[in-house]
Image: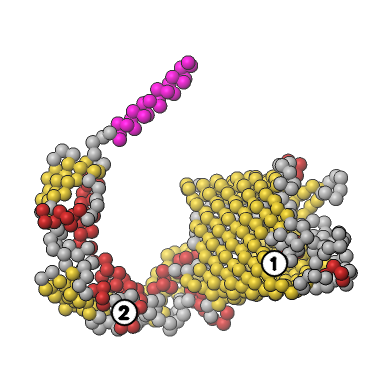
Amino acid sequence: MPKIYLKYIYCLFLYGFLCLSVQAQGKYALKVQVAAVEQATLRKYKFPTEHADSLRAERALKQLINTLHSDGYLLANTVSRLKVGDELRVQVVIGQKFTWLKLSSGNVEKALLRRSGFKESQFENDAFRFNQVARLQRSILSFAERNGYPFASLKLDSLRIEENQIGASLNLDLGPLIVFDSLDIKSDFALKTRFLGNYLDIVQGNPYDQRKIDFLAQRLRSLPYLRVSEASTLTFQNSEATVHLKVQKRPVNQMDGIIGFLPNSNRLEGLLVTGQVDVDLLNPFGSGKRIGLHWQRLSEETQNLNLQYAHPNVLGSPLNLDFAFDFLKQDTLYTKRVFDIEIGYNLGGNSFLNAFSTSEGTDLIGTPRIVNNRLPPIIDFDLTSYGLGFKWNNFDDPFVISSGTGINVKASTGNKKISRNVSLPAALYQGIDLKTLQYTFEMGFQNYLRLKNNFVLVNKLSGGLKANEQLFQNDAFRLGGLKSIRGFNENFFFATKYALATLEGRLLFDESSYLLLFTDLAHLRGEFKESPTSDWALGMGAGLSFATSSGIFNFIYALGSSQNTGRFNFNQSKIHFGYTTKF
């Protein structure tokens, strides 16, 4: 046997011996002694008797005494202790159990007690528990802090002890009523105080609410166009609370251009050059608005235009209003237009409830080929749907995320109307229900886990479902490309049901620059009326994102494989690179 293997086996034995030696070290014993009449009580509390060292034994003893106190044994105490070798011997007196005689409401209003969950029956002839009183105190004081009384205090008054029963009454001192003053903002760019106050829900004259202060940092982190340069402070004067903020402008307005070189399937030689332009203007007038323009050329005859406008805190209310218009020309087959309007309401922190309406329509450009006297896979239709959505996240940054979790769920339903195309025979529409109800459900989950200072593991799950008895290709979700299944052309797949999982590792150079390795796995089903489809798709690759003083350079190389397209083919690999300018 080679010497190197002998050394390896020797090291394994040595390592195992050391591990066994550590495990075999003498354990520290904790022995608790009580009077005979209290042994039954002690047996109710299961606590470890063997510990790694004396410090852990002392902690276990302290935890036992605290547990006894919280269960009403207020006189429980250690009366003697003795250390003998690896053993700690203690004598504990548990004492009698104290119960409530009565806890009266005192000067606390009945309505406030109901809101705090107070029930008199819990404080009559029941065990006296510290944690129960503490919960009641936290609940009442928390309600006061949320309604203009941050200096409120609550104590037990008229305390009396009769044998082993305790009676008391609540005494609440609300203190002065505090209202919010205007925000004190110091910034190096245009930022309207009225907008930021409405966004943070800190409005002059409104009662002080501690929740607004607790969520202040998280809400400010969600604004991508500013960076908090100093920790916010809070001052009180003349029954008014003033929030002081110091923020700096963050260059996030962007122009993003991406060029893709793909094999041209319509020609024997040469490449097909595709493109994408994204323009996003955030906070253009100092009032938090957002304007977006996005254009894509997916193939020679396919182009897509998307326009967005977001207006936060409409008329000073907590409502946000978003508009979006999307227009798609798909080859020489059809055009599709989608108009979406969404009203969002902040539930607190970064939680939003959205109500939306979507108007969608498709028009055929030419006359599609008819096979077996059936409707073609693409038809003319109009769909108007209404739905609800929920969004939540705790990302550490709205753009360059390195830690946090996000959830997005939306569901809608609407009436779908199929239009008769005069270029198609009327017989094709016989037996077809031209008016049907269509359901749509979408969900997304993202998790960014920072394992080390310079490594981030990204996990993403998303899925979608469209339900209707008559689904066609222009109904479907479109997947594939840089933002979904990398390694395939943009919007390559048509699916009425899909599940997509992404695993990505990022090796950080700094907060905005990193190398990445990724894999995208998707299951796709197209439950179309005439030609159902099913497919598995896998995308793998690597990339680089590199930040400069004026923007971010992106480069991604990806390979794709699916059941229908075959195995990985380096001749069909996808290269995407672009430069995002920020100003």
Q: Which mark is residue 113?
A: 2
State how far apart marks 2 and 1 are (Cα): 51 Å
Depth check, front residue: 109 or 404: 109
Could you say where residue 301 lies in the image, as x and y percent from the top left?
A: 82, 59
Q: Amino acid at mark 1?
A: Asn
* Up-down relation of residue 55 to residue 194 (above or below): above
Depth check, front residue: 515 or 327: 327
Element type where label 2 sits in the image: helix
* Up-down relation of residue 31 to residue 38 (above or below): above
Q: Which mark is residue 468?
A: 1
Dominant SS type (magenta): helix
Could you say where residue 434 lies in the image, as x and y percent from the top left?
A: 77, 73
In the figure, is residue 335 to the left or right of 251?
right
Q: Is residue 123 visible?
A: yes
- Taking the magenta stretch, the answer to whether it contains residue 18 is yes
Q: Residue placed at 20% from the left, 72% from the top?
A: 125
Q: Is residue 79 visible?
A: no
Q: How dense is the environment of label 2, judged by Cα within 10 Å: few (below 14), some, or many (20 and up)?
A: some
Q: Residue placed at 16% from the left, 72% from the top?
A: 166
Could you say where residue 542 lies in the image, as x and y percent from the top left?
A: 63, 45
Could you say where residue 436 lies in the image, as x and y percent from the top left?
A: 71, 72
**Quarter of the image where the C terminus is located:** bottom right
Q: How dense is the environment of label 1, judged by Cα within 10 Å: few (below 14), some, or many (20 and up)?
A: some
**Which range is magenta?**
1-23
